[in-house]
Amino acid sequence: MTAPLGTPVSPWGGHELPAHIVGASPTRAPRKRRPGLWIGLAVGVVAIGAVAALQTTANLGYDDAEANFESARDSAQVSVTNLQQSSDALTATSEIANQLLQSDTGVLTDPAAKEALGAAVTEAGDLASAASDHAAVSLPDADPKPTFFWELFGETDELDQDADDLDQLVAELDAEVPGLADAGTSVEEAGLGFLASAATAATAFEAAHVSAKNLDIIALRDAASDVSGAATLDDLTVPSFVALQDAAAQVVASEQTELAEKAGPLLGARLEIEAFARSLAPGVLLEFDWNPIVNNAGENGSMGGLTTWWWDEPDRAVIELSNSVAEQWPADRSKALVAHEVGHAISVKCEDMYDSSTQDSIEKWATAWAIGMGFTDDANGVWAYGYPPQSYIDASYACR
């Protein structure tokens, strides 16, 4: 191959590369990096930060909502407990009142008081039942805490709603409690009024059955005192009321027995004499026995009397009279003898007015008392025991 002119020829033959090929290589410009990678990384970092922030916010919000929910639930539980306790208390009071109604024989109680108590018990029963149903409400529980922020946000909203519902429930349950308390007060007041009517009636009942034995009358008084002293309806209320009614029944039975023993042609005179004696000694509980012979007297126109009395409360005595006292009634001598015996009986009210240490002074006192009451027939004790000291007669005026 012929070399072009001006081109050096190698002595070894071959060929040379063109200058533009074999010459110095041109400097290569630096390759530019694309900005998309950095932007992607930055976006990734921002996204991760945003997610972390959302997760943190969601966690904190959920924790606050859960704490608020638990507080609301605790308050609701307290309200449920209070309502149930109030319902139970009303039910207990109503049950006592209902037992009073069931055990009432109608002997002593006022029908109007009984009707009022029945109405109060009925109303209380309805309120207590409704309250107990409301207190049986099932309170919600918080579900396990979610993991992801989108779940946390949803559960937070639900907890907030549940807390609001619980607050509303608390308001509703608490609003019922005062009504239950008022109903309990109504039942108790009606119950105490019912009991008071029976206790008060015992006095008139006693007066209507004066022929009953003293101890049965005393038992009636004691039972009435127990009932009238009640300040609340409790475990003792019903037994006390039943005891009062039993005492009243025993008074009736006792009187019937006494009247049966006094029955016969002298019954009318006997009862008149007993009423006469009671009129002379107001406040002294008197019981009477009748026999053919008393204190060795009763035959051939004679009359006999014997009195036993007790210094302790209440003022009481038992007067025994011979049938002849009734047979001669209402002669002055019968009245004088009865007055003498009442003088013994009424001494329970005036024991400090005379010397009770000897039988003679005791009899002189009874005679003086009869004289002081205006009974001057010798059957007043003068015939049997002699005339009493004027000091006894003077003292007897203060014993009435």
Image: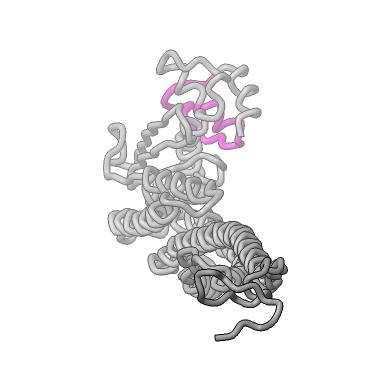
Q: In which quarter of the image is residue 16?
A: bottom right
- The answer to whether residue 373 is magenta is yes
| Region of the chain picked out in magenta, as a range | 366-388
Residue placed at 47% from the left, 17% from the top? Answer: 356
> As displayed, is residue 297 above or below residue 105?
above
Identify the image quadrant of the C terminus. top right
> As displayed, is residue 229 above or below residue 97?
above
Asked if residue 189 shows in the view, the reply is: no
Q: Quadrant of residue 157?
A: bottom right
Residue placed at 51% from the left, 74% from the top? Answer: 13
> As displayed, is residue 19 above or below residue 311?
below
Left or right? Give the position of 148 relative to 179: left
Q: Could you tell me residue 128's position as x and y percent?
A: 51, 70
Main secondary structure along the magenta-highlighted residues: helix
Q: Could you tell me residue 354's position as x and y percent?
A: 54, 18
Q: Could you tell me residue 198's position as x and y percent?
A: 51, 59
Front residue of this view, candidates 11 and 29: 11
Q: Could you tell me residue 244's position as x and y percent?
A: 42, 54
Asked if residue 27 shows in the view, the reply is: yes
Residue placed at 49% from the left, 35% from the top? Answer: 315
Front residue of this view, candidates 119 and 301: 119
> As displayed, is residue 142 above or below residue 287?
below
- The answer to whether residue 1 is magenta is no
Residue placed at 70% from the left, 70% from the top? Answer: 32
